[in-house]
Amino acid sequence: MTTPIENRPEDHPIAPYLRMDRMPHIWCPTCGIGTVVKCFASALGEAGVDLDKTAIVSGIGCTGRVAGYMNLDAFHATHGRAIPFATGLKLGRPELEVVVFSGDGDLSGIGGNHFIHAARRNMDLLVILVNNFIYGMTGGQNAPTTPETARSSTMPFGNFERPFNLPHLAASCGATFVSRWTCLHIRRLTKCIRTALGRKGFRFIEVIAPCSTLYSRLNRLGSGLDLIKFYHDNSEIRHGADTRDLDIGFQDHFVCGNFVDEERPTFLEQMNAHYSKTLGDRYVPMQPEGGWIHE
Amino acid sequence: MKADPAGVLTGVHYLDGDYACGEGAMAAGCRFVAGYPITPSTEVVERISRRFPMMGGTFIQMEDELASMAAVAGGVWTGTKCMTVTSGPGFSLMMENIGLATMMEAPCVVVNVQRGGPSTGLPTMVGQADMMQARWGSHGDYELIALSPQSPQEAFDLTIDAFNLAETWRVPVMFMMDECVGHMTEKVVIPPADEIEVVPRVLTDKKPGEYKPYAVNGRPVPENVRAGDGYRFHTTGLTHDERGYPAMTVECQSTAVRRLIDKIRLNADQIVRYEEEDVEGADVVVVAYGITARVTRAGIDLARAQGVKVGFMRLIVVWPFPEKRIRELAGSVKAFVVPEINYGQMVLEVERCAAGRATTTLVPHLGGGVHDPEDICRAIVEAAK
Amino acid sequence: MRNWRTPLDTGKVKIPVGRVVIIADRCKGCAFCVEYCPKDVLVMSDGFNKKGYHPPEVIKTGECVNCNLCEMICPDFAIFCVPAEEAEQAAEGGLN
């Protein structure tokens, strides 16, 4: 006998992927993070990954709260340090699929150094960066991704700093999978995450999402829905575009798509190959199940 | 549990303190190290980088100390014993993530081979000026464990103890070496693996669904879990409840943080460790640790030759501080003399515990070298008057 | 969708019918679903949920094509679709 479908939160298809005991989440009305989480959960289901062997690490910030809501082994690390924390997880138990899900300020600001080195090393991590162009949780400060002339609480007369072009940064540091989507591109984003889950190496997906309460309000851009309508009218999908052309101006036309998809040995693959070659029989690699020593 | 023989370099060796510490870690079962080079600690990771590939260990030189400590805080959750190694400036950088490890109750070892400070200070010369930082370096209320070896042999033995303490109390343990011990080469005897007792990472036997990451049920520490075993647990640096979920309430802060501190504070008797010589009937007791303990013995001999009744207390576990013993001794001795290679750190603890019942004298050395035993002797003789 | 001729497989391809399930108390009134439903099946209602937001409501019953776009785009996990027959069967199975 099937239970009739009532309007219960646990009937929602995303329920198995969420910590239902922590719903509803803290994100604002018209914030785009929830949509990105839905796409991620759908991709997890479609990719058929072993959820018991999938871990998620988030930093601090609004997007940093994602790990806390996911029904996976979930870690809420310190600001900017999600990537090295995830590195520790991956290297301590190589069979884990480790996802880093955090915000633009967290991963490219304070976490910038870790971002570039993990990309350089081709550390086997899937990094989903939600870019709302601002530090939302702390009240709307300027971020390394804030477009020029946009206002924020620490740039009240408009930003005069040049922002990062994140796909270009990731690609130039050696990321093997680089994409940019917005939270409006729900199907393409889901497919992109699904594809990325099947790849190895440093995979970077930037997702542009509205911040209604801070970025949008401080810049008088309306609600999150208005920003999403803006994405609809002003985003252009250009797969394989040169990442140098992916700068984002304030309320300007921007490009999204899949830009880089290559195969290169991951950090662990390189390490294992190198030690096997130089040490031969003496080399004892760490087992995929990890370094737990027990009786 | 007996040590995993793959990591135990049994034999009689001539090693420096740094190398001995690395060997101790490998003997204790450490299999993931994330580090960043900084004099005078670099040799620890250099040794580990050379031997780890033969025993299933992974070493990674991270991009900075913040990443190193973050990687250790993450690696712990795979059931692997983890360690990082640094000196003063790196220790400062690691503080936030040491706080994270404390809050998450992640057992790990952080080695600080102390050098002259503050700031860049004296990179290649000894100091003991990070002792208070070991206890108070990160923000907020917390307690952890710190040890101080006085020789390369102790650098080996006490590193194993550090890992055992970390596992028992689920806390980051600060291994406070100093540059002298780290760069001193002496005989180190490494016993066979079956003579080394290690505390293994014991995982919970509860099923996913029944297990709560921070439920203690009357024990001092919660049961361990490993990522990838299907428990789908959550942990955070935010103040959290038994489920590991953020619970930012006055009540939860009080319960959770109090437990974090009490697990060490109320069990200090089981953790504290020191060595005493001739304190019974002594007029003056000298309290020292690390390399200064060895120099102190020479100073004590000089003072005894002048007829002073001197006792010696060597701190092995520096934090939690042996308050009870100092309070006891304060009732029967005239004075404490505390030589240390700083301008007064552990002396403050001695003074606090003595509570005025015995005088407390600091014999400072600002760093870069060890004390002149004459200076220690002079202070002892002075204190005995 | 207007076709300039009838597709050859019109007889074979069945347009799915879905039923929208709205978890009203979860909704934060963002209106993404209303804006992007391809069949314009939803509007923001005048009613309030427990938190004071206006949740959406279905105004064109029977026109939902079970595309799940609302389910994907809702940031609050407050709306999803199920195939209509499944919903009917389940409703008939009922509270026995």
Image: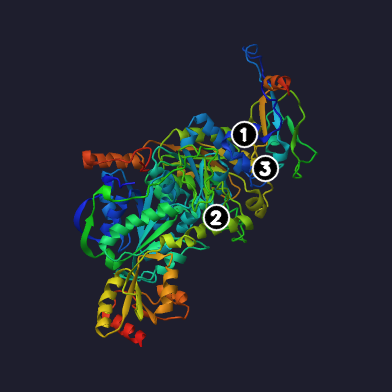
According to the image, label 3 marks what residue?
A225
Which residue shows up at 63% across the image and 56% down it?
B251
The kind of residue on which mark 3 rests is Leu
Q: Chain of mark 1?
A: C
Count of picture labels? 3
On the rendered structure, is B320 left or right of A2? left
In the image, B105 versus C3, the foreground residue is B105
Q: Quadrant of residue A190?
A: top right
Q: Could you give the CA–CA distance between mark 3 and mark 2, rounded to whole angstroms? A: 22 Å
Q: Are marks 2 and 1 on the same chain?
A: no
* Three-letter amino acid code of the residue under disc 1: Met
- SS of the residue under disc 3: helix
In percent of width and height, residue C54 lies at 76, 41
Q: Amino acid at mark 2?
A: Ala
Provide the residue designation for mark 2: A143
Residues packed near mark 1 inside 10 Å, few (<14), some (14 to 19) or many (20 plus)? many
Q: Position of residue B207 (x, y in %)?
A: 51, 37
Report the mark closest to the observer, 2 or 1. Answer: 1
Q: Secondary structure at mark 2?
A: loop
Q: Position of residue B151 (x, y in %)?
A: 27, 64
Please, what secondary structure does the residue beneath circle 1 have?
helix
Marks 1 and 3 close (CB-CB < 8 Å): no
Residue that badge 1 annotates: C72
Mark 3 — on which chain does it sit? A
- Of B342 and A80, nearer the camera is B342
